[in-house]
Amino acid sequence: MAISYEDIVKVPKALLHDHLDGGLRPATIVELAAEAGHELPATDPEALGRWFAEAANSGSLERYLETFAHTVAVMQTAPALRRVARECALDLAADGVVYAEVRFAPEQHLEQNLTLDEVVDAVVTGFREGSALAAEAGNPIRVGTLLTAMRHAARSQEIAELAVRHRDTGVVGFDIAGAEAGFPPTRHLDAFEYLQRENFHFTIHAGEAFGLPSIWQAIQWCGADRLGHGVRIVDDITPGNPPVLGRLAAYVRDKRIPLELCPSSNVQTGAAASIADHPIGLLRDLRFRVTVNTDNRLMSGTSMSREMALLVDAFGYGWKELQWFTINAMKSAFIPFDERLKIIDEVIKPAYAKLIG
Ligand SMILES: O=c1[nH]cnc2c1ncn2[C@@H]1O[C@H](CO)[C@@H](O)[C@H]1O
Ligand SMILES: [Zn+2]
């Protein structure tokens, strides 16, 4: 029997790549925009949700990113940041996500004179509140924060230090994001070298809107633990029976470097023609360390369960494959090994065992 979306909501899921400013509830944006005096393209929540999905559906990462102006604009005070983070934790938990790493760029939230530390404190507090409320409602979730530096800007060292400063209070990793073409990872080499010396974890958006050189730099120059997207690693795989892996693709697979794949987002930015054409099918068959992610729930009108349901439809996956994606994600999380194992053994495996038999 085919797996339904409702069934998928009920099983535990792990999410590594989700942007806080890409996941607001449309109704919250409307309320916060009224308070902030920010003009929106639509003020009816449903119409606003549709506007985001359509505007982000442009085939270009640069145009997709323009839509974030309207979410970032309403996330400029501590109460607003805290609310958005609280609702994020609640929404993910209600969707059956038991572990999530949510990222955002603190440097984009300074327009009303918050300090970087105040921004992080507000978000971490919101996640803590949301997780507590979710647990009370019977949907326990653990949320880790990733701090992102914008790759076109020049604050990555500062943001890396901010992440390390908050490592014991909820921040579990670092990332760079923004337009990829023209802004290679090595621009931020100092920050990545600093993080390595601090024994800290980081992922890098690479191989989304730009190809193999970006992935190669992220791994071999910068030392990324994971690849944000990394979908263009397929450019280093020659189709055939069997497909032939180039040296970089072989390295990524041999080292079990996690790929944070985001199917719907890739279709919107033009990195894949459709879900059925998405390289996730090939990469899973070749047993890369594939994980499934939402990227931006608002811009893609999606959720973790919906991404998995789309893959079930396109590739005929069953519970075995969904468990494999989920355990891959949990193995690749930035929290300590013993905590990852506990979630795998006590939460994920028992739930899927009931379905797989
Ligand atoms: O898929 C993506 N690729 C690159 N950058 C992104 C993507 N999604 C969001 N952001 C960027 O990350 C910032 C912090 O969350 C967002 O403001 C957006 O500019
Ligand atoms: Zn992203």
Image (cartoon, rainbow, N blue to C red):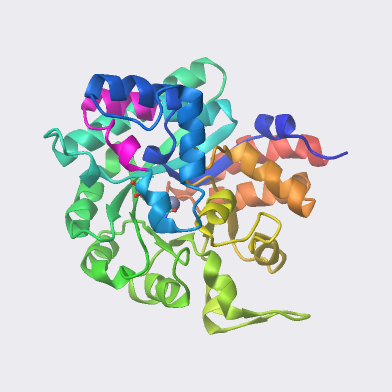
Residue 339 visible within the image: no
Q: Residue furthest top?
A: 136
Whether 20 is among the magenta residues is no
Q: Percent x, y for residue 14? A: 56, 42
Q: Percent x, y for residue 312? A: 74, 47
Whether 74 is among the magenta residues is yes
Q: Is residue 199 left or right of residue 19?
A: left
> In the displayed structure, would residue 245 be above or below residue 316?
below
Most frequent secondary structure within the magenta stretch: helix
> In the displayed structure, would residue 155 be above or below residue 232?
above
* Residue sitting nearer the eye, 245 or 355: 245
Q: Percent x, y for residue 313? A: 76, 47
Which residue is depicted at the point 50% across and 15% down? 136
Quadrant containing the N terminus in the rendered view: top right
**Segment tinted magenta in the rendering:** 68-86
Q: Residue furthest front?
A: 41
Which residue is depicted at the point 25% across and 19% down? 35
Q: Is residue 119 left or right of residue 345?
A: left
Q: Percent x, y for residue 45? A: 46, 23
Quadrant containing the C terminus in the rendered view: top right
Total marks drawn? 0
Where is residue 81, by image quadrant?
A: top left
Residue 4 visible within the image: yes
Q: Is residue 105 left or right of residue 262?
A: left
Q: Residue furthest left?
A: 113
Which residue is depicted at the point 62% across and 66% down? 288
* Residue sitting nearer the eye, 302 or 218: 302
Q: Is residue 115 left or right of residue 296?
A: left
Which residue is depicted at the point 78% across and 47% down? 318
